[in-house]
Image (cartoon, grey):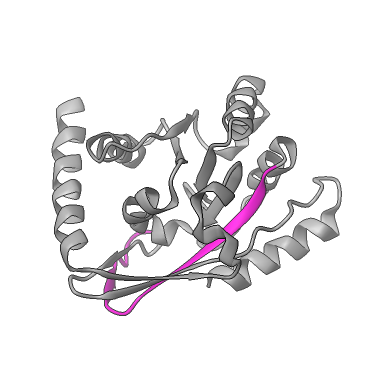
């Protein structure tokens, strides 16, 4: 089975390398301070699962950012292989954010955050529904004292995979890709339902 992961990962990496030579990226910052990597530390960088493929191009730019990857599904195992081939590290969690009640997971993620590492997550994944923000992300941000940085991605020419729940998106060669990095947002206290809903609405408005 591992050879299958490796084969699929090699195909993805080949596609990434091809696109790296042809895509034109435009980087926009709501907070100009984030243009300097030293100002992007211990933050939770978020977008929607539909745009996960762009992470392979964003990670080298964002610096010191580890995506949270489940170790329980086929796609996640392929993602881990791709990240390894691209010389990027990831932080693994057991299944999805419902497991953040496991103190072992929490302690490791909090240690990463306190060391200055940024964590990246698709906040409606790994199973959807599409664009529905999962509350576990707020729990992590609150407990680890991490600000939330939303990212909006728009490619001029792309394809979407219609049968996937997330309408997974892949940019086409020679397309212009605009990446908007939002200003850091303070996480809501988990006990404040109204604050959680306000931040959910704010994040969705900044990422869609």
Looking at this view, name the residue that lies furthest to the bottom.
Answer: 156
107 falls in the magenta region: no
Question: Which x, y percent locates residue 54?
Answer: 35, 58
Q: Residue at x 32, y 42 (%)?
A: 75
Residue 4 drawn above or below residue 35: above
In the picture, measured across the screen, residue 120 lies left or right of residue 81, that is right
Q: Quadrant of residue 144?
A: top right
Question: Which x, y percent locates residue 139?
Answer: 71, 41
Question: Which x, y percent locates residue 199?
Answer: 73, 61
Residue 7 drawn above or below residue 40: above
Q: Quadrant of residue 190?
A: top right
Q: Is residue 196 visible?
A: yes
147 falls in the magenta region: yes
Q: Residue at x 58, y 36 (%)?
A: 116
Question: Which x, y percent locates residue 8?
Answer: 17, 42
Residue 79 drawn above or below residue 108: below
In the picture, measured across the screen, residue 203 lies left or right of residue 34, that is right
- In the picture, which quadrant includes the N terminus? top left
Principal SS element in the magenta part?
A: strand
* Front-most of residues 60 and 80: 60
In the picture, measured across the screen, residue 43 lies left or right of residue 9, that is right
Looking at this view, name the residue that lies furthest to the top.
Answer: 104
Q: Quadrant of residue 85?
A: top left
| Residue range corresponding to the magenta coloring | 146-164
* Front-most of residues 197 and 153: 153
Tell me how many marks there are.
Answer: 0
Q: Is residue 123 visible?
A: no
């Amino acid at each position: 089975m591992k050879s299958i992961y490796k084969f699929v990962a090699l195909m993805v990496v080949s596609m990434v390398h091809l696109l790296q030579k042809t895509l034109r990226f435009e980087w926009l910052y709501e907070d100009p301070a984030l243009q300097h990597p030293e100002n992007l530390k211990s933050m939770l960088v978020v977008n929607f699962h539909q745009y996960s493929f762009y992470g392979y191009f964003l990670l080298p730019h964002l610096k010191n950012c580890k995506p949270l990857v489940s170790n329980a599904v086929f796609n996640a195992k392929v993602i881990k292989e791709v990240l390894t081939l691209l010389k990027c590290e990831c932080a693994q969690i057991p299944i999805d954010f419902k497991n953040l009640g496991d103190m072992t997971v929490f302690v490791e993620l909090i240690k990463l955050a306190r060391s200055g590492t940024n964590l990246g997550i698709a906040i409606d994944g790994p199973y959807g529904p599409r664009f529905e923000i999962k509350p576990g992300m707020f729990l992590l941000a609150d407990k680890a004292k991490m600000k939330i940085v939303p990212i909006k991605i728009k490619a001029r020419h792309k394809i979407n995979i219609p049968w996937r729940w997330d309408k997974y998106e892949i940019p086409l060669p020679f397309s212009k890709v605009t990446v908007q990095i939002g200003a850091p947002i303070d996480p809501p206290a988990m006990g404040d339902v109204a604050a959680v809903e306000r931040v959910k609405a704010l994040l969705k408005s900044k990422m869609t």
